[in-house]
Image: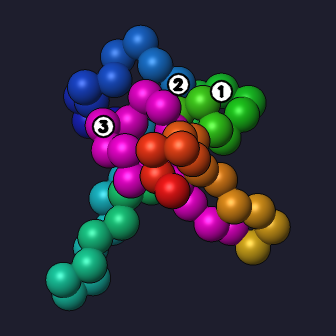
Amino acid sequence: MANLPYPHSHILTIFTLYRKTSKIDVIVSNSTTAISPIFQYHSTVLMNFITTHSVFCAYPQLTL
């Protein structure tokens, strides 16, 4: 596990996957909820996402 800029958060570790020009950060939570690290990650891109079961928008008034 690398030294991360998240020492006191719910982010346990981050794995970065690369394929050609694409990059994906896989965030591993050290809590029982998957949503808690979202607000502690450095990118606001995570604050809006779509899954097969739901749509999540952390700040709908600012986004829409």
Query: What percent of the width, then of the height, locates residue 47?
Result: 49, 46
In the rendered structure, the answer to whether residue 55 lies left or right of residue 29 reads right
Amino acid type at circle 3 is: His
Residue topped by disc 3: 42
The residue shown at (75%, 73%) is 52
Callout 1 amino acid:
Ser
Give whichever of 62, 31 is nearer the camera: 62
Q: Residue at point 20% right, 87% down?
A: 20
| Region of the chain picked out in magenta, as a range | 38-51
Instruction: Tell me, yes or no, whether the two marked residues, 2 and 1, touch with CB atoms within 8 Å.
Output: yes
The reply to whether residue 27 is in sight is no
Q: Mark 2 points at which residue?
A: 10
Q: Nearer the observer, disc 3 or disc 1? A: 3
- Kindly identify which residue carries mark 1: 31
Is residue 15 visible from the viewing direction of this image?
Answer: yes
State the image coordinates of residue 45 (x, y, percent, origin top left).
38, 53
Q: Is residue 5 depicted above or below 34 in this figure? A: above
